[in-house]
Image (tube, grey):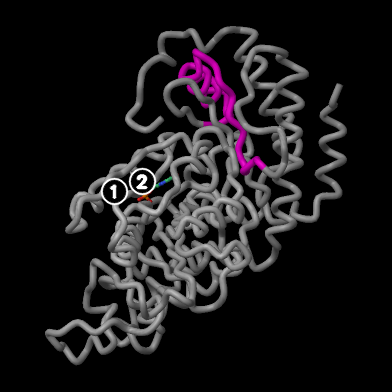
């Protein structure tokens, strides 16, 4: 049996332990939903206040020049780059993820004009599928979007496939896909590869350079903790820059926005994928949120993430054998930073757990999802969370009618 004391020993030697104090957390609550919305950190508060009081409050319009607001999308992109294995100048912070996918899908289709198929995963996040279909429907030539079982990708790839879009860590099951192997196969078929890093950035070490990824996009409000609706980021490999065209051009992606020319001329590099004014307060929050990442390596984060998820799975199986189907892969190389437990009463279980101070979330039709974020979670939190899950299961409190009420956000 794994004991609470053993977990406390692990916490005592945890080199990331001190980072927990950077975050606003309720001591009575165990937050296992940082994969949906990361918590507030002290540095976010500081940086946002600085932008409010000094840059906007006092500097007003001068701050576009004096405070470097214009450069913020690429400066913050360069701060995210090391987290995904990108080089400086390859990452841009702008818009939100779904919009960035629209830009990248549209841009990629124009690079494979003789091809008519886009492949994506039938288990993908719905927003990805909606926007891919919408962009393809307006591509100016017939494009078939095939939502496939990703395990059949090999047999779907052929010389009519223009683009493959996959989410690197499955948002439901937490399965992490082999980015390098899949990208290589897609390239062998002459197609382009677009990765969605929504559940990967800040969760698993990524190396877009080594994997020769063409394009990627992700969000910052999940594992990167930039706050609700925080901006997204995109990655465009250097060799595509200057070739790939932004299908939604705007003045701030122009080479000389203040010349007010009517003919669009793209700026150099990823800046061409900026459409409109950067949302400076949201970018300030991201800037602050990234400070925490200056103190850790993705390898440290990964090691603790695997230890936390291993511990959670072991405790669930030890305390509640056979009660849940552990959907998340056991093999480390196939696991993201979350654990998904399948149960037909999943919705009520999550509501009953939130009532007991364990915040996870539910993903239809039957997945209880628990995110593990090494920056602020302790081993003892994992122990206590499983203890409370065991209480909910033993008491069957999840059957209470009040836990059946469906909220807009699950
Ligand atoms: C969270 C998530 C999104 C969200 O997109 P937004 O446009 O930022 O709201 C998109 N795709 C996946 C796979 C996600 O997990």
Picture coordinates of residue 178, whole percent (x, y): 61, 48
Residue shown at the point (49%, 31%) measured from the top left = 361
In the rendered image of this protein, does residue 246 appear above or below residue 305? Answer: below
Residue shown at the point (31%, 62%) measured from the top left = 103
The CA distance from mark 2 to mark 1 is 5 Å
Q: Secondary structure at mark 1?
A: helix
In the rendered image of this protein, does residue 175 appear above or below residue 50? Answer: above
In the rendered image of this protein, does residue 356 appear above or below residue 290? Answer: above
Do the residues under discs 2 and 1 have CB atoms within 8 angstroms?
yes
Was residue 46 drawn as part of the magenta stretch in this picture?
no
Quadrant of the frame with the C terminus: top left
Judge left or right: residue 350 versus residue 160. Answer: right
Picture coordinates of residue 121, whole percent (x, y): 43, 40
Q: Which residue is mark 1?
A: 131
Q: Residue furthest front?
A: 159
Picture coordinates of residue 244, whole percent (x, y): 35, 72
Q: Residues within 10 Å of mark 2 (few under 14, many from 20)?
A: many
Q: Which residue is mark 2?
A: 128
Q: Residue furthest left?
A: 262
Nearest to the observer: residue 121 or residue 85: 121
Write down the region rendered in magenta. Answer: 334-360
Q: Residue furthest bottom?
A: 259
Q: Secondary structure at mark 2?
A: helix
Tell me: is circle 2 under 8 Å from ligand 1. Answer: yes
Quadrant of the frame with the N terminus: top right
Picture coordinates of residue 313, whole percent (x, y): 71, 28
């Amino acid at each position: 049996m794994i004991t609470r004391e053993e977990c406390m020993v692990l916490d005592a030697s945890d080199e990331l332990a001190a980072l927990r104090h950077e975050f606003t957390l309720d001591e009575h609550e165990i937050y296992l939903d940082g994969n949906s919305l990361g918590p507030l950190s002290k540095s976010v508060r500081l940086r946002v206040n600085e932008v409010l009081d000094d840059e906007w409050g006092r500097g007003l319009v001068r701050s576009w020049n004096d405070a470097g607001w214009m450069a913020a999308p690429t400066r913050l992109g360069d701060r995210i780059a090391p987290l995904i294995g990108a080089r400086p100048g390859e990452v841009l912070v702008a818009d939100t993820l779904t919009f960035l996918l629209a830009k990248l899908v549209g841009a990629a289709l124009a690079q494979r004009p003789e091809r008519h198929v886009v492949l994506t995963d039938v288990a993908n996040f719905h927003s990805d599928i909606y926007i891919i279909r919408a962009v393809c429907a307006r591509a100016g030539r017939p494009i078939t979007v095939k939502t496939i079982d990703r395990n059949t990708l090999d047999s779907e790839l052929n010389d009519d496939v223009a683009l493959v879009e996959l989410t690197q860590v499955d948002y439901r099951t937490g399965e992490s896909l082999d980015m390098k192997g899949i990208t290589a196969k897609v390239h062998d078929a002459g197609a382009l590869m677009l990765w969605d890093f929504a559940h990967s950035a800040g969760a698993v070490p990524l190396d877009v350079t080594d994997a020769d990824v063409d394009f990627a996009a992700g969000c910052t409000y999940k594992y990167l903790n930039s706050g609700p609706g925080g901006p997204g980021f995109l990655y465009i490999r250097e060799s595509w820059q200057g070739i790939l065209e932004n299908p939604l051009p705007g003045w701030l992606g122009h080479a000389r926005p203040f010349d007010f020319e009517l003919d669009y001329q793209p700026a150099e590099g990823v800046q061409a994928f900026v459409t409109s004014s950067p949302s400076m307060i949201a970018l300030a929050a991201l800037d602050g949120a990234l400070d925490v990442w200056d103190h850790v390596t993705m390898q440290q984060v990964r090691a603790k993430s695997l230890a936390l998820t291993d511990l959670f799975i072991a405790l669930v199986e030890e305390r509640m054998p056979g009660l849940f189907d552990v959907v998340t892969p056991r093999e480390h190389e196939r696991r993201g930073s979350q654990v998904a437990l399948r149960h037909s009463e999943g919705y009520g279980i999550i509501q009953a757990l939130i009532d007991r101070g364990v915040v996870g979330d539910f993903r239809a039709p039957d997945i209880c999802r628990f995110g593990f974020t090494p920056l602020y979670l302790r081993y003892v939190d994992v122990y206590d969370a499983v203890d409370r899950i065991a209480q909910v299961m033993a008491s069957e409190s999840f059957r209470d009618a009040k836990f059946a009420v469906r909220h807009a956000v699950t």
